[in-house]
């Protein structure tokens, strides 16, 4: 078995320490951090780390026993030649760093979400990753969580008939939070293409100044996908997703803790109520971060795209910026692709 050397840029929560925040929370089987997950994957070796803060480098060395530590991530890549680079810095660095890491020829790249602060940045990432041929994915962890994967399989197997509508319940901001929401929407519906979007940023008075917002606003949206499927978010609730089909409804509740299935159940010729079954949780819950990094390495070895590759991530980002553009222009709907590639939203 070949082993691959993984290097982390940004030795903070997601890179190193977040596991301590989510102990005994069954929706997120640990390890959550990239460093922690790397330890559980025999094909990966935690080889190096970079952070601009000396105290973060010191803490990382003490926690994980890694000695190859750098202030400058480019120097780390040039000297250590890692096979995988995990970009775990805050949002405004994601796109420029991914472009740089791809251009340095790193074959596997993990980048935290959201991938970019504008569509111009997202285009640059897509072009750099296409050019380098690097395998790529971002930290939209629900895609890798067993419950959501089971939900996707049930929908694909026809348990609810043809999906017609999806409703997400949860209050969150556009880039940091709805990058998760939209990736899960895409996963549950089988990665369809969005055609057009209605979106609003909140509070509703929020305005771009010279095409920029300096903080990531809350948002609501409604998306029309190919095949006439509609998806929307409701600004409240406990991070639930309901997918409504021609034969039933599948609900992933409490951020992935439960799945419930309501199916049309004929009582008589004219009466078909929807009766609910709560399904048992998946038998073998596994750390989504481990499943995700495993897919990155398997994609590299098998010469295939990752299951959340650059094209899927770029499209999800296009939907996010269509929401922002709809608010910015004050129009009812925006068609994809978004014309204005330069709207910029700074996010962590
Ligand atoms: N996928 C998830 O569920 C999840 C969970 C938590 C955080 N995140 C994401 O992870 C990213 C990081 O968040 P966090 O909470 O870990 O932040 P953090 O502040 O704890 O860590 C970021 C680290 O990056 C370092 N850094 C900044 N600039 C750098 C540079 N130029 N070179 C090297 N290091 C640099 C900082 O010093 C800091 O140590 C964010 O984008 C956040 O959205 C995702």
Image (spheres, helix red, strand yellow):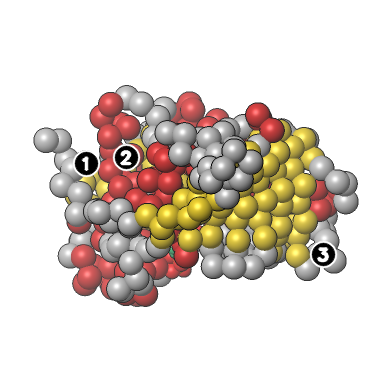
**Residue drawn where x is 28% and y is 68% of the image:** 60
Few, some or many residues within 10 Å of mark 3 (<14, 14–19, 20+): few
| Quarter occupied by residue 54 | bottom left
Q: Quadrant of the N terminus?
A: top left
- N-term mark: 2 or 1: 1
Viewer-nearest residue: 233 or 333: 233
Residue to which mark 3 is pinned: 204
Residue that extends furthest to the left in the rendered view of this protein: 1
Mark count: 3
Q: Is residue 135 above or below residue 15?
A: above
Camera-nearest label, 2 or 1: 2
Q: Residue 269: in sight, yes or no?
A: yes
| Quarter occupied by residue 15 | bottom left
Q: Quadrant of ligand 1?
A: bottom left
Q: Is residue 340 above or below residue 344?
A: above
Viewer-nearest residue: 202 or 166: 166
């Amino acid at each position: 078995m070949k082993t691959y050397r993984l290097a982390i840029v940004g030795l903070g929560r997601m890179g190193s320490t977040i596991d301590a925040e989510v102990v005994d929370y069954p929706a997120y089987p640990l390890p959550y951090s990239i460093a922690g997950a790397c330890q559980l994957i025999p094909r990966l070796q935690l080889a190096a780390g970079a952070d601009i803060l000396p105290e973060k480098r010191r803490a990382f060395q003490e926690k994980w026993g890694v000695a190859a530590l750098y202030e400058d991530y480019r120097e780390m890549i040039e000297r250590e030649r890692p096979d995988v680079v995990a970009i775990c810095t805050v949002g405004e660095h994601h796109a420029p760093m991914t472009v740089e890491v791809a251009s340095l020829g790193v074959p596997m790249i993990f980048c935290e979400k959201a991938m970019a602060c504008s569509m111009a940045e997202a285009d640059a990432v897509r072009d750099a990753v296409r050019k380098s041929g690097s395998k790529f994915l971002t930290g939209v962890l629900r895609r890798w969580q067993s419950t959501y994967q089971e939900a996707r399989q049930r929908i694909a197997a026809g348990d609810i008939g043809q999906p017609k509508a999806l409703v997400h319940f949860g209050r969150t901001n556009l880039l940091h939070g709805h990058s998760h929401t939209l990736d899960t929407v895409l996963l549950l519906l089988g990665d369809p293409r969005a055609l057009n979007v209605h979106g609003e940023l909140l509070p509703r008075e929020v305005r771009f100044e010279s095409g920029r917002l300096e903080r990531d606003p809350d948002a609501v949206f409604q998306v029309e996908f190919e095949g006439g499927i509609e998806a929307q978010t409701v600004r409240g609730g406990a991070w639930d997703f309901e997918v409504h089909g021609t034969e039933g409804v599948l609900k992933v509740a409490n951020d992935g803790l439960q799945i419930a299935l309501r199916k049309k159940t004929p009582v008589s010729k004219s009466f078909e109520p929807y009766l609910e079954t709560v399904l048992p949780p998946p038998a073998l819950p596994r750390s989504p971060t481990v499943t995700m990094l495993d897919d990155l390495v398997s994609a590299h070895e098998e010469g295939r795209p990752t299951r959340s590759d650059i094209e899927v991530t770029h499209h999800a980002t296009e939907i996010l910026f269509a929401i922002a553009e709809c608010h910015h222009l004050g129009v009812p709907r925006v068609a994809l692709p978004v014309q204005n590639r330069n709207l910029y939203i700074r996010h962590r």
